[in-house]
Image: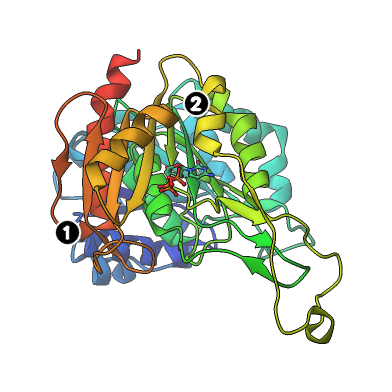
Amino acid sequence: MVLGVTGGIAAYKSVQVARDLTRLGAEVDVVMTAGAGRFVRPLSFEGVTGRPALTDLFSADGAAQHIRLGYDADVVCVAPTTADFIARAAQGRANDLLSTTLLATRAPVLISPAMNDRMFAHPQTQRNLKHLHEALGYAIVGPASGPLAFGEGEGPGRMLEPGYIVQEIGRALGADPAFTGRKVLITAGPTREPLDPVRYLGNRSSGRMGFALAEAAWLRGADVCVVAGPVAVPAPYGPEIVSVETALEMHAAVGERVGETDLNIFAAAVADFRPTDPSEDKLKRAEVGPEFQIGLTANPDIAAETKSLRRGGAVTVGFALETSDLVENAQRKLDDKGFDLIVANDATDPLAGFDVDTNVATLVWREGEPEALPTMTKHELAERILQGVAALLGEGE
Ligand code: CTP
């Protein structure tokens, strides 16, 4: 891949991008503009990529280098991209090695802008970016908001963090036609049902499985929204996260969105009941007495009760955690909740369930035989589920 570096203060962070990509196994050719060389030395990149950093359009390494780099690249990412380079790219200039590379490539191109917030907001810059995105199909990744090197501004202008740029490159390379541009809705994590302002009924779901699915679908090019209860793990970069607490809030958030999606995945461990009368004040031990009865009311079954709102042709996946009769119970839920696939886990298996990174699942399809899968990580299981779903998404066209 080609990592283009242009002349902004964020160029020092590009060394980290080059290092991360190299460690992931990529062959990274760094191409620097003259401005970039004022901020960071070619040697810094050479040290992390093990390849010469390229700066010269007219080098002795063969006259065709300005073309070859673009031909050979699987992806071209320019990070940071200055306002000047954005303007040059939008005009189709070919006055240095990086701009010729852009013209010569047919690989996906990512542009990661980094500049003063006023320069970014300027109509010239915005018009150029719009052209790069809409006419040329370049992905514009970032900028982020936050403190800038100069000025009072905290508006968008900062380069996206290196880890996120690497994620965006992964998405550009991993695009899957079955998922690209598809809308995916995922529920994840537990719900919390309040007893009083400080206590709740909940469960040990961490959100790992739902987030692994969200990240995997996003990396395949889908437009992903996760309605997440109070999860124990950090949210993935990329998907939109809608945070909720209770089953009723999760139900409302799903109801608002499920009419527009191509794929729904119900991975949340929704509390089936909530305290009927949560106290407005903190319950006092002395007032409650030695025994405490809690009245519970059934929560909506979110998957079942939003079934009629789903778009025709949408594919829906559910999960089931069982302690006995795994396949039979899963098959019943498949019908009751209108799922095309249910991922059934055995709750008695220590390698499956809430607090672990692994899962042991049986895929129970509406059509076809159940598939008992070996123990795998939740990320591997997410990939396996999406591979299976890709075929169904094609059918729903
Ligand atoms: N589910 C849901 N809303 C609920 C309960 C469950 O959307 N109130 C979804 C889960 O996200 C999961 C599927 O339904 O995809 C099955 O969850 P599970 O807890 O196994 O099902 P229940 O219907 O609660 O069955 P059980 O009687 O085994 O508790």
Amino acid type assigned to the residue bearing label 2 in the image: Thr
Q: Secondary structure at mark 2?
A: loop
Q: Residue at x 53, y 62 (%)?
A: 231
Residue where numbered disc 2 is placed: 261
Camera-side residue: 261 or 359? Answer: 359
Camera-side residue: 7 or 350? Answer: 350
Disc with the residue nearer the chain's start (2 vs 1): 2
Residue where numbered disc 1 is placed: 375
Q: Secondary structure at mark 1?
A: loop
Seen in the picture, residue 74 relative to 312 is either above or below; the reply is: below
Q: Residue at x 27, y 64 (%)?
A: 348
Q: Position of residue 135 (x, y in %)?
A: 48, 20
Quadrant position of the C terminus in the picture: top left
Q: Residues within 10 Å of mark 2 (few under 14, many from 20)?
A: many
Q: Is residue 108 visible?
A: no
Amino acid type assigned to the residue bearing label 1 in the image: Thr
Q: Position of residue 149 (x, y in %)?
A: 66, 65
Q: Position of residue 276 (x, y in %)?
A: 73, 54
